[in-house]
Amino acid sequence: MTGYRTPARLFHWIVALLVLATIPAGQIMIQDGLSRSVQNALFIFHKNVGVVILLVVLARLAYRQVVPPPPLPLSVPEWQRRVAGLTHAALYGLLIFMAVTGYLRVRAGGFPIEALDALGLPTFVPRSEALEAWAKAAHWWGRIALVAVIALHVAAAAWHGLVRRDGVMARIWPPVAR
């Protein structure tokens, strides 16, 4: 069975690790009782890692256009192929949605995104309480959808890697000495 090439694997695992870091940071940063310095550090981390996630996801999508993913093994039923395709599309769509709604929420609220500000990029979004409120709600609901789709993705990976042992998980697993 052929696996993903190294760049695709790197894109996958970089995004996975960054998302797994930003989700709890995003949840913790909005809790009551945090010191202002901890809350500020978490907000800065969450916003700027969100920018990195968006850039890596866009690079991965561009890479997929040039180097398509390897086909699933013939042992994978057609319905699972369809679910896998829909799940991957949902993951990409939700990751982009989260970055865009996060950006809109922050910029419409008049807050900085330090990495973009350091590059001298304009904000592109005027201050707007209505847009900020909409983006905040959309980002919150998007988080729930993203966590659900990630859970489905991880469950399917575990099913293929631990139960079926059909090589599907090995296609994306980091290439390490065995």
Image (cartoon, helix red, strand yellow):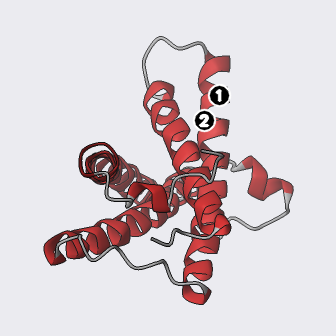
Determine the residue positioned at 54% across, 69% down: 4
The picture places residue 95, in percent across and down from the top left corner, at: 46, 60
Q: Is residue 155 above or below residue 138?
A: above
- Helix, strand or loop at label 1? It is helix
Residue type at mark 1 is: Asn
Residue 141 in the image: state x and y as whole percent.
Answer: 29, 50
Q: Residue 166 occupies which quadrant of the picture?
A: bottom left
Viewer-proximal residue, 146 or 123? 146
Please identify the quadrant where the C terminus is shown.
top right
Disc 2 versus disc 1: distance between alpha carbons?
A: 5 Å
Q: Residue at x 63, y 19 (%)?
A: 38
- Mark 2 is on which residue type? Phe
Q: Residues within 10 Å of mark 1 (few under 14, many from 20)?
A: few
Nearest the camera: 149 or 120?
A: 149
Residue nearest the viewer, comparing 105 with 8 = 8
Q: Which residue is mark 2?
A: 43
How would you rate the neighbour count of disc 2 (Cα within 10 Å): few for under 14, some for 14-19, many for 20 or more? Answer: some
> Residue at label 1?
40
Is label 2 in contact with label 1 (beta carbons under 8 Å)? yes
Q: Secondary structure at mark 2?
A: helix
